[in-house]
Image: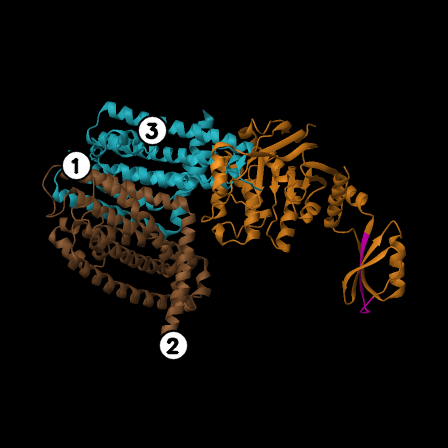
Chain colours: A cyan, B brown, C orange
């Protein structure tokens, strides 16, 4: 129990450290955050234009897309701010940078993930919050559902990233591929679900978990229900456990020192 | 004298471009990634058009679902072929390498642009058939009058050149701001929205269309893209002239920027 | 007293997958994985008592870093028995982590955009140090490593020497019983190296912590440690105290003379002239042939001496001789 408490305190210290680190370069922080917010607004405006012409797409209206965007932007932003280390996890594995984390008595994955933060994520979260507010998802009554939705989205996005990047323990050069898949996940998650059917939608709940990053949480906000909440919780838990499992297996292999190609 | 120099310069920069293209070819995963991304986007948006238009009326006179899908394939082909030149220049500025190389600004910039163009050329060659294949598959065939696509090719290539010049300018902004990525994001979104990446300008409200036409962006994407709607040589000519005019404008801007950058370098010492 | 570190027949092999060449190779690699086994450590055995300061010396690829990584729990051994502070590093890595510290010369654990002080506070959380005790310890270390001015500046603004001192303080905050140092002075200038070495020696003495140091630089070995383990091709060549190493290995002395005369000539058997400068002569005396006293007497009689020193040859030579000896015995075998 005290170990858990120690780990939580450590996590909190890491987050604070992260924040301080990104604020240390104040100019860059504001530039990244504000321009990312503008970026998202501009992207959303294309949807606005589309809905000006066609009031309905597959049963979805502008408000629904607004909710979807809000959830994904907030979740993605939270992910890269709190667990910014996902992006170069593969490279760190490849370059042996996990050594210094291994020598310290705290969980390696947590340490590595929370050691980096990407400032533009604040812009994502801000624009996400604005969108959710406009969609009416920030009313006191909906706050719990919205919170769970965003947390779930962030969780699955991070976990799927960790899973893919962890393949670097076994396969060389996975970093680019993992980043591509993450990019696709993000892209797919911002499009209304009814657009995709059959084989594609299976894909969207597995390899490219856009369904869990976008659609499911958005549904939870649109039409909150206990079933959806349970689904979101299960998805988050399931993906997180899977990611941790794969990473830990990877660490075992890392500890064996066996690697592809020659290395000093 | 100048003609001879011009020929030599062209040959030199041409060689640089060729080397760059070869290098890009070796980085297969990056190329494959872009091709895949193009396929994904065309796929997703063809689903959108399918859902929206389906059996319904045409959104634009003369342009049905098929034409709109091909339109997107063309615009994405142009945009995705442009490499992140601004990152390379930003890295040089940050590391200070540029100080030595920028003493003769034309050389440095020329080299960078030549390299980027080499890569762009290769991507255009690879992404073109990719985009066409996906569009053909999703749209169920060629657009009504496929001759337009032939016109789209040179226009699209020229549009990419303009985009490369723009990213060079963005890269030079690293002299004034440390991180150029945010500038790139905004430029990219302006291209998306005002250039009509996903939606042709015909679908825009009048005020936005007018606003967009005052910028270089429609010439870059909508100009080549709308060739998918039909064979329109007059429109193509208009786009060509716009591209050339804006190209000259961006070129002048680039020259001015590099001169200011050089001045700034001598002031602050790198 | 139980040894701090105990190694018995340690063996570590890596399975390295051959990288495919060309298209044919890549295709073949899809079906058949060609691996070869690399032996990094072969039958290594030694024990280190608490408080000892030991140098782990060897050329590139000798297995030093690998051994260090096994001892700190980063890598798993292939065979053999390893005990660090009574624990098995591979199995009880986290428990051990609270009691050991590590500094990898080329990698930093300091956050570059923030002052080192912030990283220290984070480490206090990592090692779950009691706040008042941590502050006392931190202030003590900051004072003795003389980084008070430097500790509030962002790390990326520091010089390499300053950074290394901060790095060392960071690794000592939690009072580790063993400190593993992998190339701690790499890239530092002469003055910085000397400073770091002095600090390490002091700390080892004050805290009583065991130090295990790997380095290419034999100067590290000379200044900080009392015992040397020479490793080559994954095997232990030699395990001696520093003094014994010097005495036992080369029966030679270096004599440096500064004279009023521009040049000094010494024609004695067993005395070899080394590259010298004007007014300053370097001589090598082979003690098997002639005694140092005779050489000194000859010099003093034959010139106006301003300064004279008699020293052991640099450790580089000693170690090179050891490797050469090992190579000879390997080639003979």
Q: Quadrant of residue C259?
A: bottom right
Please give the name of the residue rendered at 15% of the width and 38% of the height, measured from the top-left corner: B52
> Residue C150 placed where, x, y %?
52, 52
Q: Earlier in the sequence, mark 2 or mark 1?
A: 2
Q: Of tags 2 and 1, which is closer to the observer?
A: 2
Mark in the foreground, 3 or 1: 1
- Name the chain letter of the residue that bears numbered label 1: B
Query: For the residues tagged 2 and 3, is the chain the same?
Result: no
Rate crowding at label 1 as few (under 14), some (14 to 19) or many (20 or more) other CA atoms within 10 Å. some
Residue under circle 2?
Answer: B1
Q: Dot 2: what SS? A: loop
**Majority SS type along the magenta span:** strand
Residue B85 visible in the displayed image? yes
Residue B179, placed above or below residue C123: below
Q: Give the farthest residue toward the bottom.
A: B1
Part of the protein shown in magenta: C253-263
Mark 3: secondary structure:
helix
Closest to the observer: A12 or B67? B67
In the picture of the structure, the residue carrying the numbered disc 1 is B51
Q: Disc 1 on helix, strand or loop?
A: helix
Q: Name which quarter of the figure residue C50 lies in.
A: top right
Spatial CA distance of label 3 from label 1 is 31 Å
Chain of the residue where label 2 is placed in the rendered structure: B
Quadrant location, the C terminus of chain A: top right
Does the magenta run of residues contain B134?
no
Spatial CA span between label 2 and label 3: 70 Å
Any mark on residue A17, and which? none
- The residue identified by callout 3 is A236
Give percent across and percent down for residue C2: 68, 27
**In the image, what residue occupies the spot 65% across and 30% down?**
C10
Residue B177 falls in image quadrant:
bottom left
Closest to the observer, C308 or A40:
A40
């Amino acid at each position: 129990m005290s170990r858990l408490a120690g780990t939580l305190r450590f996590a909190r210290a890491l987050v604070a450290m992260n924040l301080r680190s990104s604020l240390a370069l104040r100019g860059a922080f504001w530039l990244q955050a504000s321009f990312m917010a503008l970026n998202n607004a501009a992207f959303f405006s294309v949807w606005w234009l589309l809905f000006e012409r066609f009031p309905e797409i597959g049963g979805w209206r502008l408000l629904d897309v607004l909710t979807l965007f809000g959830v994904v932007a907030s979740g993605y932003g939270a992910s890269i701010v709190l667990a910014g280390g996902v992006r170069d996890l593969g490279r760190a594995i490849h370059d042996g940078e996990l050594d210094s984390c291994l020598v310290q008595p705290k969980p390696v994955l947590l340490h590595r993930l929370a050691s980096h933060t990407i400032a533009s994520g604040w812009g994502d979260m801000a624009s996400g919050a604005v969108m959710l507010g406009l969609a009416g998802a920030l009313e006191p009554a909906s706050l719990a559902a919205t919170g769970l939705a965003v947390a779930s989205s962030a969780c699955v996005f991070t976990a799927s990233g960790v899973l893919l990047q962890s393949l670097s323990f076994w396969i060389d050069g996975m970093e680019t591929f993992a980043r591509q898949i993450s990019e696709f996940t993000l892209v797919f998650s911002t499009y209304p679900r009814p657009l995709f059917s059959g084989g594609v939608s299976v894909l969207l709940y597995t390899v490219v978990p856009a369904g869990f990053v976008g659609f499911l949480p958005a549904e939870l906000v649109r039409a909150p229900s206990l079933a959806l909440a349970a689904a979101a919780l299960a998805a988050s838990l399931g993906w997180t456990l899977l990611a941790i499992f794969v990473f830990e297996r990877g660490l075992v292999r890392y500890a064996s020192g066996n690697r592809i190609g020659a290395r000093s | 004298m100048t003609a001879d120099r011009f020929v030599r310069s062209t040959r030199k920069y041409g060689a640089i471009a060729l080397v760059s293209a070869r290098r890009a070819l070796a980085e297969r995963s990056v190329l494959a990634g872009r091709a895949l991304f193009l396929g994904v986007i065309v796929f997703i948006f063809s689903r959108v058009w399918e859902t929206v238009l389906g059996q319904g009326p045409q959104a634009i006179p003369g342009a049905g679902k098929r034409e709109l899908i091909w339109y997107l394939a063309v615009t994405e082909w142009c945009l995705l072929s442009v490499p992140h030149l601004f990152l390379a220049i930003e890295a040089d500025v940050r590391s200070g390498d540029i100080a030595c190389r920028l003493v003769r600004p034309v050389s440095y910039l020329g080299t960078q642009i030549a390299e980027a163009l080499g890569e762009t050329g290769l991507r255009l060659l690879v992404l073109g058939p990719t985009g066409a294949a996906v569009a053909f598959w999703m749209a169920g065939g060629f657009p009504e009058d496929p001759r337009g696509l032939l016109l789209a090719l040179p226009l699209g290539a020229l549009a990419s050149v303009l985009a490369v010049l723009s990213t060079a300018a963005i890269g030079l902004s690293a002299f004034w701001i440390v991180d150029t990525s945010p500038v790139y994001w905004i430029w990219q979104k302006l291209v998306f929205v005002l250039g009509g990446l996903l939606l042709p300008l015909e679908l825009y409200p009048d005020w936005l269309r007018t606003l967009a036409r005052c910028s270089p962006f429609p010439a870059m994407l909508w100009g080549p893209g709308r060739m998918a709607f039909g064979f329109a040589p007059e429109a193509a000519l208009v786009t060509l002239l716009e591209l050339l005019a804006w190209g000259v404008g961006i070129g002048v801007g680039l020259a001015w920027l590099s001169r200011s950058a050089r001045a700034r370098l001598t002031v602050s010492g790198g | 007293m139980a040894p701090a570190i105990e190694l018995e027949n340690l063996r570590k092999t890596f399975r390295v997958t051959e990288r495919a060449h060309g298209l044919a190779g890549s295709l073949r690699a899809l079906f058949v994985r060609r691996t070869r086994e690399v032996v990094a450590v072969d039958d290594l055995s030694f024990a280190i008592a608490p408080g000892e300061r030991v140098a782990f010396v060897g050329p590139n690829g000798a297995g030093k870093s690998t051994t260090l990584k096994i001892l700190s729990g980063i890598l798993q051994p292939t065979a053999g028995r390893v005990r660090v502070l009574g624990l098995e590093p591979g199995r009880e890595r986290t428990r051990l982590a609270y009691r050991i510290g590590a500094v990898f010369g080329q990698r930093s654990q300091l956050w570059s955009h923030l002052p080192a002080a912030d990283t220290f506070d984070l480490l206090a959380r990592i090692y779950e140090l009691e706040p008042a005790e941590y502050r006392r310890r931190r202030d003590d270390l900051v004072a003795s490593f003389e980084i008070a001015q430097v500790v509030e500046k962002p790390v990326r603004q520091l010089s390499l020497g300053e950074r290394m001192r901060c790095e060392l303080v960071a690794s000592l905050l939690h009072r580790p019983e063993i400190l593993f140092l992998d190339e701690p002075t790499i890239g530092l200038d002469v003055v910085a190296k000397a400073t770091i070495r002095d600090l390490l020696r002091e700390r080892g003495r004050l805290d009583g912590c065991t130090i295990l140091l790997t380095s290419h630089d034999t100067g590290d070995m000379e200044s900080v440690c009392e015992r040397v383990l020479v490793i080559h091709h994954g095997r232990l060549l030699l395990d001696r105290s520093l003094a014994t190493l010097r005495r036992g290995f080369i029966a030679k002395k270096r004599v440096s003379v500064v004279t009023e005369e521009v040049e000094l000539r010494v024609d004695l058997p067993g005395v070899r002239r080394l590259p010298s400068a004007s007014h300053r002569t370097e001589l090598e005396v082979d003690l098997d042939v002639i005694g140092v006293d005779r050489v000194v007497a000859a010099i003093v009689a034959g010139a106006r001496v301003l300064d004279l020193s008699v020293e052991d040859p640099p450790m580089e030579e000693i170690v090179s001789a050891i490797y050469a000896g090992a190579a000879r015995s390997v080639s003979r075998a």
